[in-house]
Image: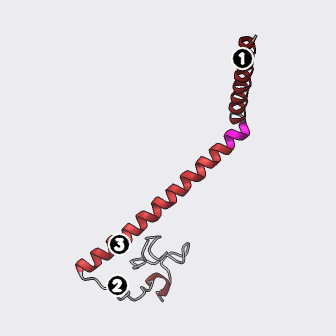
Amino acid sequence: MFRRTFWFTAGAAAGVWATTKVNRKLKQLTPESLANQAAGKALEAGHRLKDFALDVRDGMAQREAELDEALGLNANPELPSPRRVAALENSKPPKYSKNPTYVERSTYSYNRNEDH
C-alpha cells in the first residue's frame, strides 16, 4: 500500500512539473514574447555598439593628441582667411543670358562639401 501511494505521488509530481515546464515554454514562444525578446536584444546590441563607438572615438582623440605632440603641431592652429567667390563678385555681365550666374574662367569651387 505504501508503495502505491509513493508511486502515485511521484507520478503526480512529475506530471505537474512537466505541465509547468511546457506551459512556460509555450508562453516564451508567443509572438508578443518573441517580439519583447527581440526588442530587448536589439537594445542591448545598440548599447554595446554605442559603447564601442565611444571607445573608438576616445582612442582616436588620444592617438591624435599623441601624433600632434610627436609632430610638434599646435593645438590651435591659425585658421586660413575665408575665401571669396569670384563668380558672385564679378562685375562683368554674364556671357550667356540663359544662365546669368555662369561666369567663364571663375575660381568658384565646385566641391559641394567644402563650406559645410
At label 1, counting other C-alpha atoms closer than 10 Å, the crowd grade (few under 14, some 14-19, many 20 or more) is few
Q: As shown in the figure, which amino acid type bears the numbered disc 2?
A: Ala
* x and y percentages locating residue 16 in the rendered image: 74, 25
At label 2, counting other C-alpha atoms closer than 10 Å, the crowd grade (few under 14, some 14-19, many 20 or more) is few
Which residue is located at x 54 percent, y 73 percent?
99
Q: 83 or 69, which is in the foreground?
A: 69
**Spatial separation of the CA atoms under disc 2 and disc 1:** 83 Å
Which residue is located at x 32 percent, y 70 percent?
63
Identify the mark nearer the N-term, 2 or 1: 1
Q: What element carries label 2?
A: loop
* x and y percentages locating residue 66 in the rendered image: 29, 75
Residue 30 lies, with reference to residue 71, above or below; the image says above
Task: Name the residue tied to disc 3.
Answer: 62
**Spatial separation of the CA atoms under disc 1 and disc 3:** 71 Å
Residue 11 lies, with reference to residue 49, above or below; the image says above
Which disc is residue 6 wearing? 1
Q: As shown in the figure, which amino acid type bears the numbered disc 3?
A: Gln
Chief secondary structure of the magenta portion: helix
Task: Name the residue tied to disc 2.
Answer: 75
Q: Quadrant of residue 13?
A: top right
Residue 39 lies, with reference to residue 93, above or below; the image says above
For the N terminus, the quadrant is top right
Q: 25 or 2, which is in the foreground?
A: 2
In the image: residue 102, left or right of residue 25: left
Q: Is residue 32 magenta?
A: yes
Instruction: Point out the residue furthest to the front here.
Output: 2
Q: Is mark 3 on a helix, strand or loop?
A: helix
Q: Which residues are drawn in magenta?
A: 31-35
